[in-house]
Amino acid sequence: MGSITLEHVNKSFGEVEIIPDISLEIEDGEFVVFVGPSGCGKSTLLRLIAGLEDTTSGHIKLDGEDVTGAPPARRGLAMVFQSYALYPHMSVRDNIAFPLKMAKTPQAVIDQKVDYAARTLNLGSYLDRRPRALSGGQRQRVAIGRAIVREPKAFLFDEPLSNLDAALRVNMRLEITELHQQLKTTMIYVTHDQVEAMTMADRIVVLNAGNVEQFGSPLELYKRPANRFVAGFIGSPKMNFVDGPEAEKHKAHSIGVRPEHFTLSTTAGAGQWAGTVNVAEQLGSDTFLHVEVEGLGLMTVRTDGEQTFRHGDKVYLTPAANRIYRFDAAGLALQD
Amino acid sequence: MARNASVQTKVGFTVLAWAVALLLFSPILWTIVTAFKTEAEAIATPPTFLPLTFTLDNFGDVQDRSDYIKHAWNSILVSVGSTLLGLVIAIPAAWSMAFAPTKRTKDILMWMLSTKMMPAVGVLIPIYLIFRDLRLLDTVHGLTIIMTLINLPIIIWMLYTYFKEIPVDILEAARMDGAELWSEIVHVLVPMAIPGIASTLLLNVILAWNEAFWTITLTSGRAGTLTAFISSFSSPQGLFLAKLSAASLLAIAPILLLGWFSQKQLVRGLTFGAVK
Amino acid sequence: MATRQTRTLARTMMAPAVIVLLIWMAVPLAMTIWFSFQNYSLINPMMTGFAGWGNYEYVIGDPSFTQALVNTLLLVGGVLLITVIGGTFLALLLDQPIWGQGVLRILVISPFFVMPPVAALIWKNGFMHPGYGMLGHLFKALGLEPVDWFAQYPLFSVIVIVAWQWLPFATLILLTALQSLSEEQREAAEMDGANAVNRFRYIILPHMARAITIVILIQTIFLLGIFAEIRVTTGGGPGYASTNITFLVFRTGILSNDIGAGSAGGVVAVIIANIVAIFLMRAVGKNLDA
């Protein structure tokens, strides 16, 4: 019902290629997240799917039907914008009803659907208010409500939580995930926050400078990153990378160890990396140490919150043997 | 500088400011008081300030003159008509420049503004002859067309600046919601741009009402506007000074009132964005 | 955010405005140029044919042209001087802490909204008339002979009327620019030891330079075409004492029905306007790049 296929999609502005060549297959009902650093093309890709931008070449298919030349109004998709893009001169009710009005739906049906959306999203008490009288979270819900009533083939979210404060963001993340479980419609979600990506997605598309670095489930990306970029992007705090002789010991150009894959000791032992604590971040649940390791550079290490460390403490790190990622000179992951 | 100005400074500046302002306003003030005087009193020596005999006769006489009514009506038709016609042409153009700009958009906009800078006498003669041959001379519709042409650049410019203040993603949301172009403009753009459209309307009605070149050169009695009407009294005849003041007051009062409310629009519309 | 669709639509939507203005620009101007090279007079239909540069020689050679040219420059220059200096002074004054700023602004801005014929007649009859004008009364009260302004100083009188009308525009623009100067900048200058005069010279005036430039440019465009005020008061006279280029063309082409000569005058007016514009842009262009 809501499968989306991209075939060799290219988007260029004159000489500049924002997206050189992307091919993707998104299955009906999937929650797919486009994630990547600023400027990687994730929003552009979303807008190409939406029809708000033209592809320079390549095809976009919805449920097998080629929609490459079709305007947004005819693609049957719904989009939730980063700024919510609510109509300021209309009430919440009219905002949600607008797509139905455009589709010339009979008024009785409109009222029914608006009420359903309002109940689903808890908007009942402010249906008659204007957007300027609502809080950020409420406006977000209205934007989602407007998208729901269209019963689209797929939902497109363009960094919807960026404008909310941290606590609200966590709540909305859950609400959107629950919505997906309830509606079972395909959702494509763009974010620069890898935590959102990991917690919400069925599969993640990691983008970098217009190229797909990897397309897989969150755990796949975590456990088997295809290259250095994905390895360093997924996971927080970032993976530690080491080049040079230490990497050669493991028959690789560079190796990576995640902060959570170290065993920490205060006494010296064999096969260990010795270092001095630079900064200790104590969160209570975890402690993150930034350790200056002799000869290897600054490393981030995670340990449990019970231990206290201070600047200058000597520590000894043992990376878990089976959790060392190996990369070749081009940055590709080496298989074991 | 506003924080702890002494009362003395404040009083000093206030007096000076009011003196200058009243001095500048005095010609208008003179018109107002003279309109309520008798003709004899209007040219009396020594002059009186407030009317000794307050009379409304002058206004009555002016209203009774059918040519005054006709000219006033022409002013309304031409200024409102030309502005509305301008809006019809300008709204799509401004939409296009604000929301679908190309590399040449800025240049085209500048070119449009430059058409306003052409001296009217450069085209006076051909326009006069064309109008004469097409029998558009001394007609309201002929005049309306010219007024539309000379104000179009300003109308487009002002709408462009107001449209640019509307967030593009709201229009994109409308497209995602299934709105075709017509719906997008009518249901979303125009309601959001109403204040801007109203401001543009206001300023351009004022500019068209006060225009005093084409309205004088292209009319001769039937389609003349108030500018032409007043101009026809250029030869001095002191006997009807009071009536002239009354007629003048009636001609300028509505625009004065409108003008008092359009200061911001004036700055936006006539400085082409260079002053904020 | 544009797609092929929106771009095609955009071109269609812009077309009416572009076409209309293009025709308005090109056709009449081309005709004026054409006529300027023809022998064409409405009161002498016998005279026809190609005139070569004859019309231009006739127009430019006539002493009225030189006088009109000088008058135009005096008119524009005089009004600019009065409005820019007066406008700056008024803007500074209105920016001070004073009571009733709202009403004051309304009083000061009013002359701009008075239509030119009315403005001209108010000054002509109410103020400058030697018999019953206010200035006449004032002079008599001071024991002086009242001056017949339009007879003795025709161009000056027109300058006064036009300056009165445009002073509000300059004031409003300069006041807007002045008020955009943050209070903090002025306070910082004060903390740095600058007195009022120095603050004006080093902080306020440079900030307003851009606005002053805009005022000069825009006013010049409109001032080159002053018409109604001359038509209603002096009719260009006595002789050609208060005729500017615009009025000269009107007189020649419309009043005297000499299409050929009038058109030549029109072309000259366009050339002069362009020269002034280029000259101005170069002279003050640097201020606009801020």
Image (spheres, coloured by chain):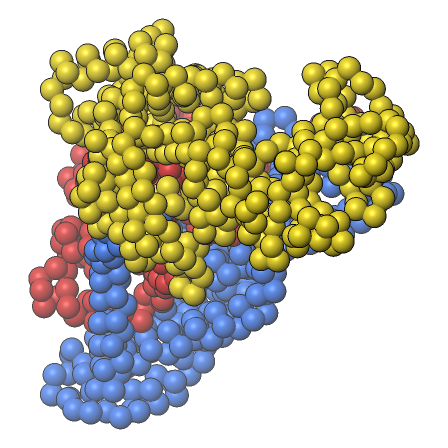
Left-right relation of B19 to B51 = right
In which image quadrant can residue C34 be found? Answer: bottom left
Residue A269: x, y in percent?
85, 33
The part of the image, by quadrant, that contains residue B212 is bottom left
In the displayed structure, C68 sits above or below B19; it is below
> Which residue is pictured at 52% across the width and 39% down the height?
A224
Image quarter (top left, top right, bottom left or bottom right) of the N terminus of chain B = top right
Chain B representation colour: red
Nearer to me, B256 or B187? B187
- In depth, the one of C53 and B271 nearer the eye is B271
Q: Nearer the viewer, residue C277 or A224?
A: A224
The colour of chain C is blue
Q: Which chain is yellow?
A: A
The residue at the point 54 percent across, 59 percent down is: C216
Residue A212 higher or lower than C230, as above or below: above
Looking at this view, is A332 or C211 the one in front?
A332
A149 is higher (above) or lower (below) than B266:
above
**Residue B46 in the image, given as x and y percentages of width and height:** 50, 38
Residue C128 appears anywhere in the view: no
Residue B235, image x, y percentages: 32, 55
Q: Say which residue appears at 53% left-offset and 55% top-offset.
A: C215
Q: Is residue A32 visible?
A: yes
Q: Is residue C158 left or right of residue A76?
A: right
Instruction: Name the residue rendered at 22%, 50% in the picture.
Output: A69
